[in-house]
Image (cartoon, grey):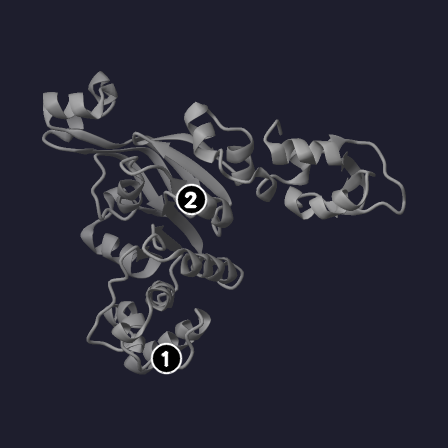
């Protein structure tokens, strides 16, 4: 059984005779040297990726790291140079034009940084556009579009035009349009980077809310680590076309793979990310009146209890059994960035 997305050995090299670069020592040259010698640029190199059904997977990195090229290779908006991509049971890399069109129309939707709304159409028609392309009956698609507008918090605005909306509202319309076709996978390519911080936070909240209401696999591309930590079940850090670390937000923040990743995550408040089991002392016991928290609780949610009492807080499993304790000193070390 495959997951929602399975990628093996994916390469994308731009330039002449790009297939000659794949897997050779030339691919390890600096970007400037490779371009000077061959006219090629390696954007994605030997990426393996598995995304489970219903997972929110975030790919992040600095500009030029290859993350946007990677997400476009998943549906062959950019043609991979080598490797395979499966969306569910469909081999996208070898799909015929008809099968690829079916994947783009029915299985995968994309949400871009630039909203791409049709200015001459009202919001209902914008949201229903993908269904129109599929040939869905007009009454059915308009009803579905109204439902999607309500789902993203824009009820009753179907008759409005895009230029009547704020940037955040337009991005909600783009999200509604992506959801309207009922895709298995949603791909987000830095969808909120053009929004101001308050609206960006609101849109992140909206996505988090929608995750509880729609069973859709999500892949996010971003350069913003706090956004990645908020939205992702797992995060991949990408550099020079490669994944240098893949793990949960707690893995990446708590145990960076190298100095570059450590620098990347140093401004993240670790107490907002790390679960109590990452810092607890295993075993032990607590007084029967002492507070307890379940496994998976973020450290920041225990700080108030630790501040009120010098006694440790118990950490319990699903059966209510104490499996560890966390005290004030351990929490302060994490907050101060001394250790994990």
Q: Residues within 10 Å of mark 1 (few under 14, many from 20)?
A: some
- Residue 157 marker: 1
Residue at point 25%, 20% (across, down): 28
Q: In the image, residue 149 lies at what x, y percent?
A: 40, 73
Residue 27, quarter of the rendered image: top left
Residue at point 38%, 40% (across, down): 60
Distance of label 1 from label 2 (alpha carbons): 31 Å
Rendered view: 302 above or below 207: above
Residue at point 51%, 39% (across, down): 268
Rendered view: 294 above or below 66: below
Q: How many marks?
A: 2
Q: Mark 1 or mark 2, which has the lower sequence index?
A: 2
Residue 187 in sight: yes
Residue at point 22%, 48% (across, down): 77
Q: In the image, residue 285 lies at what x, y percent?
A: 85, 35
Farthest residue to the right: give it: 288
> Could you tell whether 82 is left or right of 6 in the image?
left
Residue 318 in sight: no
Rendered view: 257 above or below 288: above
State the residue in front, 141 or 57: 57
State the residue in front, 307 or 81: 307
> Could you tell whether 157 is left or right of 339 in the image?
left
> Could you tell whether 31 is left or right of 212 in the image?
left
Q: Please, what secondary structure does the residue beneath circle 2 have?
A: strand
Q: Please, what secondary structure does the residue beneath circle 1 have?
A: loop
- Report the quarter where the C terminus lies: top right
Q: Residues within 10 Å of mark 2 (few under 14, many from 20)?
A: many
Mark nearest the camera among 1 and 2 is: 1
State the residue in front, 92 or 33: 33
- Residue 271 marker: none
Q: In the image, residue 116 lies at what x, y percent?
A: 24, 63
Q: Badge 2 is on which residue?
A: 58
């Amino acid at each position: 059984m495959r997951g929602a997305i399975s990628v093996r050995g994916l390469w994308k090299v731009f330039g002449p005779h790009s297939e000659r670069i794949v897997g050779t020592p030339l691919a390890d040259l600096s970007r400037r040297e490779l371009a000077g010698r061959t006219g090629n640029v390696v954007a994605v190199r030997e990426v393996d990726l598995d995304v489970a059904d219903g997972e929110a997977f975030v790919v992040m990195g600095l500009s030029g790291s290859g993350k946007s090229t990677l997400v476009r290779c998943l549906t062959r908006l950019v043609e991979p140079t080598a490797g395979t991509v499966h969306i569910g049971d469909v081999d996208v890399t070898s799909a015929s034009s008809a099968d690829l069109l079916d994947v783009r129309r029915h299985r995968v939707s994309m949400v871009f940084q630039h909203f791409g709304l049709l200015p001459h159409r009202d919001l209902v028609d914008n949201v229903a556009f993908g269904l129109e392309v599929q040939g869905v009956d007009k009454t059915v698609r308009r009803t579905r579009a109204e439902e999607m507008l309500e789902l993203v918090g824009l009820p009753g605005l179907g008759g409005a035009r895009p230029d009547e909306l704020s940037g955040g509202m337009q991005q909600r319309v783009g999200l509604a349009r992506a959801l309207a076709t009922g895709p298995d996978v949603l791909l987000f390519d830095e969808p909120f980077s053009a929004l101001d911080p308050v609206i960006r936070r609101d849109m992140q909240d909206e996505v988090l809310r929608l995750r509880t209401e729609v069973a859709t696999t999500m892949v996010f591309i971003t350069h913003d680590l706090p956004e990645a930590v908020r939205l992702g079940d797992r995060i991949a850090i990408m550099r020079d076309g490669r994944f240098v670390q893949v793990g949960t937000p707690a893995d990446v923040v708590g145990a960076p793979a190298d100095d570059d990743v450590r620098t990347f995550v140093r401004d993240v408040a670790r107490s907002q990310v790390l679960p109590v089991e990452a810092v607890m002392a295993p075993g032990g016991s607590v007084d029967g009146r002492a507070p307890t928290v379940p496994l998976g609780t973020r450290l920041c949610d225990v700080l108030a209890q630790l501040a009120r009492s010098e006694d440790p807080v118990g950490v319990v499993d699903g059966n209510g059994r104490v499996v560890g304790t966390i005290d004030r000193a351990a929490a302060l070390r994490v907050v101060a960035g001394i250790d994990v």
